[in-house]
């Protein structure tokens, strides 16, 4: 049996959301493609307990503070000890450390951009700091992988990357085993909000839309699927639900391991993000399941729902969300058309298999070129 090629991934690991689930999926596929993953976790947390894959080797490498750059030396020693041939970073923090590891080891580095750095959080100052850090180092990566065309356009415009260095590899999800069938009966319809919730996710607009829909006579309820990254935001949303007397119509489920099973109980995903996204897995999972999506018309979301794969509405508007939801509640034919187109687009463009194949093909090309360069470097100059 041939030896698996070790690759070192550098990421935070404190949460288990879209980025971490992408890494988890790649971990599960890595043996099939001849790779062994090592994960250096800079902020060890939920990743260890919630990831599905058991093929990766995890290394706790906690940064004591934001400027604990000396951890790069420890991570470089891990890469050397395990004979890693490639570094793959996720998040800006991971990229900063990976840059240091690359300088110490000479290994090629794949920088994976999962979002726009200027929209990474709800804090303007931290976003500007993140942008400045990424701008300073991203050009030094061997390859820059963008999860969507929107992120690639951002990187091309602001980071002035050489086109040969940048590639778009969309996120992917597994196909759902069963297709969601729209129920035209008068029983209450279930709206879903799905993700790891921060203020930039804007779910207050979903709650306001829910109140309006109920007041208009629609029998609707809301399942909030996922945890809150910001405790203050969670407290505010729960207070808003109470103030609007919606306690009996809103269910907070927290983290759910089997998201597909819960989505099968829902009728419409309402995705109310306020800022540009990378490529949200929440939308992709609903497309795979056939749950129709009403989403804000935001970069990173818009390209997923083209050609009638969803309903796009203006951000920061509960009235716009209401109109989109109402269109689906009152028109089963429209619902079925959107559901079918979404499933077809997901299978064609956004499968987990196509994501994995593209990532591992990228590895193969980098390593082949790297070995060629080393071979040429070993040839002495003629005297």
Image (cartoon, rainbow, N blue to C red):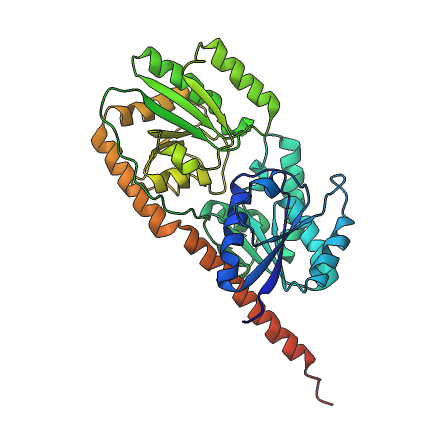
Q: Taking 53 as reference, is 336 above or below it?
A: above
Q: Taking 131 as reference, is 238 above or below it?
A: above
Q: Taking 81 as reference, is 16 above or below it?
A: above
Left or right: residue 340 versus residue 281 is left
Q: Out of 24 and 163, give the one closest to the viewer.
A: 24
Left or right: residue 93 versus residue 213 is right
Residue under the point 74% across and 43% down = 63
Q: Position of residue 215 (x, y in %)?
A: 34, 11
Split into 4 quadrants, where in the image is the N terminus?
bottom right
Q: Position of residue 252 (x, y in %)?
A: 48, 23
Split into 4 quadrants, where in the image is the C terminus?
bottom right
Q: Which residue is outermost to the left?
A: 333
**Count of number-bearing discs:** 0
**Where is residue 188, by image quadrant?**
top left
Left or right: residue 250 versus residue 111 is left
Left or right: residue 261 versus residue 375 is left
Q: Out of 346 and 127, give the one closest to the viewer.
A: 346
Residue 214 visible in the shown view = yes
Residue 299 visible in the shown view = no
Q: Position of residue 217 (x, y in %)?
A: 29, 12
Residue under the point 39% across and 18% down = 210
Q: Taking 157 as reference, is 240 above or below it?
A: above
């Amino acid at each position: 049996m041939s030896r698996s090629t070790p690759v070192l991934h550098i990421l935070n690991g404190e949460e288990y959301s879209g980025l971490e689930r992408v890494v988890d999926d790649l971990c599960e596929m890595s043996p099939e493609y001849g790779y062994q993953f090592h994960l250096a976790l800079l902020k060890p947390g939920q990743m260890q307990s919630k990831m599905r894959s058991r093929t990766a080797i995890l290394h706790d490498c906690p940064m004591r503070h934001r400027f604990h750059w000396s951890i790069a030396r420890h991570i470089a020693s891990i890469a050397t000890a395990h004979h890693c041939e490639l570094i793959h970073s996720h998040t800006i923090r991971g990229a900063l450390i990976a840059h240091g590891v690359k300088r110490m080891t000479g290994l090629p580095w794949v920088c994976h951009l999962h979002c726009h750095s200027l929209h990474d959080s709800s804090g303007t100052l931290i976003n500007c700091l993140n942008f400045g850090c990424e701008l300073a180092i991203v050009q030094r990566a061997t390859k820059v992988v963008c999860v969507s065309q929107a992120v690639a356009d951002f990187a091309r415009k602001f980071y002035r990357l050489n086109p040969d260095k940048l590639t778009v590899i969309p996120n992917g999800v597994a196909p759902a085993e069963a297709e969601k069938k729209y129920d035209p009966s008068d029983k209450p319809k279930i709206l879903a909000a799905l993700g790891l919730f921060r203020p930039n996710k804007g779910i207050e607009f979903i709650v306001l839309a829910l109140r309006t829909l109920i007041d208009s006579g629609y029998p609707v309820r809301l399942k909030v699927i996922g945890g809150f990254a910001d405790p203050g935001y969670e407290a505010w949303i729960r207070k808003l639900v109470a103030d609007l007397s919606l306690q009996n119509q809103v269910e907070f489920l927290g983290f759910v391991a089997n998201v597909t099973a819960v989505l099968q109980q829902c009728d419409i995903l309402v995705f109310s993000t306020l800022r540009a996204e990378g490529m949200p897995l929440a939308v992709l999972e609903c497309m795979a399941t056939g749950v129709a999506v009403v989403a804000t018309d935001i970069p990173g979301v818009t390209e997923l729902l083209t050609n009638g794969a969803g309903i796009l509405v203006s951000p920061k508007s509960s009235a716009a969300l209401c109109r989109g939801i109402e269109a689906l509640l009152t028109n089963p034919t429209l619902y079925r058309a959107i559901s079918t187109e979404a499933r077809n687009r997901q299978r064609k463009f956004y499968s987990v298999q196509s994501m994995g194949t593209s990532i591992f093909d990228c590895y193969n090309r980098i390593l082949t070129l790297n070995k060629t360069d080393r071979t040429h470097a070993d040839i002495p100059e003629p005297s």
